Image (spheres, grey):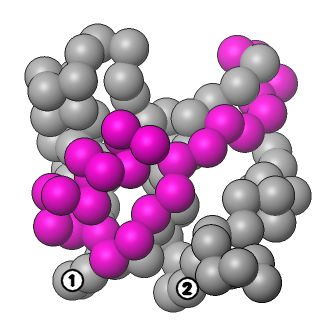
């Protein structure tokens, strides 16, 4: 949640979710799935966000992969459907 709050506060994401996804080499990778607020982000933005994350929150806070979507799926309670996202973005 701290990573999500930090990323949204940086004003480039309308909304985002950070979750762990299986990775065949590392076991798990940290993924950020987001809706962009402005023009799409690129690798340079991702590097800057990760640098800011580590500076503000600590070295262990890093996002391995970013996925841009037009809309995040919601469950019946209106919350982001993390289970559906995990299934959709399995490696």
Q: Quadrant of the N terminus?
A: top left
Residue at 13% from the left image edge and 22% from the top image edge: 55
Judge whether residue 80 can be spotted in this image.
Answer: yes
Seen in the image, is 86 located left or right of residue 87?
left
* Place of residue 12 in the rendered image (x, y in percent of width and height, measured from the top left): 21, 68
Judge whether residue 88 can be spotted in this image.
Answer: no
State which region is magenta: 1-26
Q: Nearer the viewer, mark 1 or mark 2?
A: 2
Count the numbered circles shown: 2
What label sits on residue 48 in the rendered view? none
Q: Residue furthest front?
A: 77
* 44 up-or-down from 41: above or below: above
Label 2 neighbourhood size at 10 Å, few (<14), some (14-19), many (20+)? some
What label sits on residue 71 in the rendered view? 2
Seen in the image, is 75 located left or right of residue 44?
right
Seen in the image, is 9 located left or right of residue 3?
left
* Place of residue 48 in the rendered image (x, y in percent of width and height, measured from the top left): 16, 42
60 or 75, which is in the foreground? 75
* 24 up-or-down from 88: above or below: above
Q: Quadrant of the C terminus?
A: top right
Residue at 59% from the left image edge and 78% from the top image edge: 72
What label sits on residue 38 in the rendered view? 1
Q: Real-space Cα distance between discs 1 and 2? A: 14 Å
61 or 51, which is in the foreground? 61
* Place of residue 11 in the rendered image (x, y in percent of width and height, measured from the top left): 15, 67
* Disc 2 secondary structure class: loop
* Place of residue 63 in the rendered image (x, y in percent of width and height, measured from the top left): 43, 36
Q: Are marks 1 and 2 in contact (CB under 8 Å)?
A: no
């Amino acid at each position: 949640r701290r990573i999500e709050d930090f990323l949204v506060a940086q004003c480039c994401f309308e909304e985002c979710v950070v979750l762990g996804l299986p990775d065949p080499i590392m076991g798990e990778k940290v993924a950020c799935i987001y809706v962009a607020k402005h023009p799409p982000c690129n690798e340079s933005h991702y590097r800057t966000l990760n640098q800011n994350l580590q500076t503000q929150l600590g070295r262990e806070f890093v996002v391995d992969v970013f996925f841009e979507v037009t809309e995040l799926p919601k469950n019946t309670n209106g919350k982001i459907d993390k289970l559906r996202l995990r299934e959709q973005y399995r490696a």
